[in-house]
Amino acid sequence: MSDFKEGCPKVSVLVPVYNREKYIVECIGSVLKQEFSDFEIVIVDNRSTDNTWAICQDLSRTDKRIRIFQNDKNIGPVLNWMRCIEEARGRYSKIVFSDDLLLDHCLEKMYSACTDDDVAFVFSAAKIGSSTELCTISYQNSSDSLITFDEYVARLLDHLAPLSPGAIMLRTKDLKQNLMLDIPASTPRQFLKNGAGPDILISLITASNYLYVSCIREPLVFFRAHEDSFSIRDVNDEVTLGYVSAISFFLKFHAPKYWLKYVTLSWIRQIIKRRSWGSPRKYLIQNEGCGSFVEVVQLLKHAVVLAFGKLLKSIKVFG
């Protein structure tokens, strides 16, 4: 879709769904109660085997802004995101995964923050937990601000920006253009299976094409943590490794000054998580490096610097 006709909504709220009969009503309800009302809700059911589709049909009869679609067969999560995007009629899009919620004033505040032509998208802090009361707040920066691409990448590496597109709003044309279905990473991953990798590349690629990213300190979305979530299950580390491969691929070719820092950090995290040594050379080769002696030495030096910095921070906190 190259343009947006008069009379179309300002924002398309995109809800890909599969077997979410427990959560879909609450999810859609959180959108319908937004004070900002110039939106449509595009629900695409990925051939659910539970009662989800019947619930979506009932919901569509309650508000004309709800448009529902069902795939002929299950096409996997990422292709279902694409189907949502193809049905979007708004200039801006807000992805809401069907087990998550929008918090009060989310659409209003995000829309206001991302309409400047120089702004790639807006992201906010997020509540993450089993409920909006039993949760932690992630990605909370010190203030609302406009940040450069370099600042955005730095915050992403410091866990101060979200991996999930569920915490951002952006132009629909950018969402459609920058959702990569085939990522030519050094190590092939099942990127289409759970979306880990294609999701964060939406943000990274879009940010690289604009002057600024808008950051909102307030948590405006809720990510539900539950046992059926891809990111919680993380079977065989597929989610973690998908993110590492995709981010390493992007940084190596679009922001190389951050590549080694990121690969070093992820290598250290893997060692800590698995409680076993991982070959730095092998890890470099898996994540866009060549594995040369010089590259290995650089990674190890970087690891020492990072470890020393963490030690100093600990001394400052407890001293």
Image: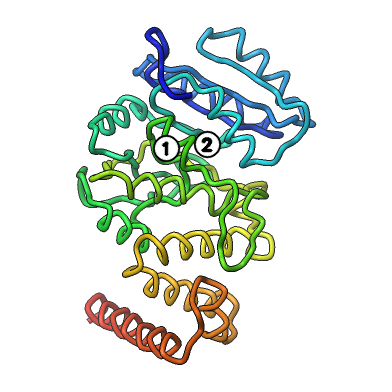
Q: Residue at x 39, y 75 (%)?
A: 260
In-front residue for pair 266/280? 280
State which quarter of the image contains the C terminus. Answer: bottom left
**Dot 2 lies on which element?**
loop
* Crowd around label 1: few <14 · some 14–19 · many ≥20 (10 Å): many
Among the 4 quarters of the image, the one containing residue 184? bottom right
Q: Tell whether 38 sits left or right of 280.
A: left
* Residue that appears at 61% across and 67% down: 187
Across and down, in percent, residue 287 comes to 52, 71
Query: Residues at badges 2 and 1 in contact (C-beta under 8 Å)?
Result: yes
Image location of residue 160, percent across then percent down: 33, 56
The amino acid on which the numbered mark 2 sits, given as a three-letter code, is Asp
Provide residue 216's location: percent of width, then percent of height. Answer: 27, 41
Question: In the shown orientation, is residue 70 left or right of residue 250?
Answer: right
Residue carrying label 1: 221
Q: How far apart are marks 2 and 1 (CA)?
A: 8 Å
Of marks 2 and 1, which one's residue comes earlier in the chain? 2
Q: Which residue corresponds to the image point at 44% horizontal and 24% vertical from the top-left?
A: 2
Mark number displayed over residue 100:
2
Horizontal and vertical percent position of residue 240: 56, 62
Residue 65 vertical placement versus 73 (above, below): above
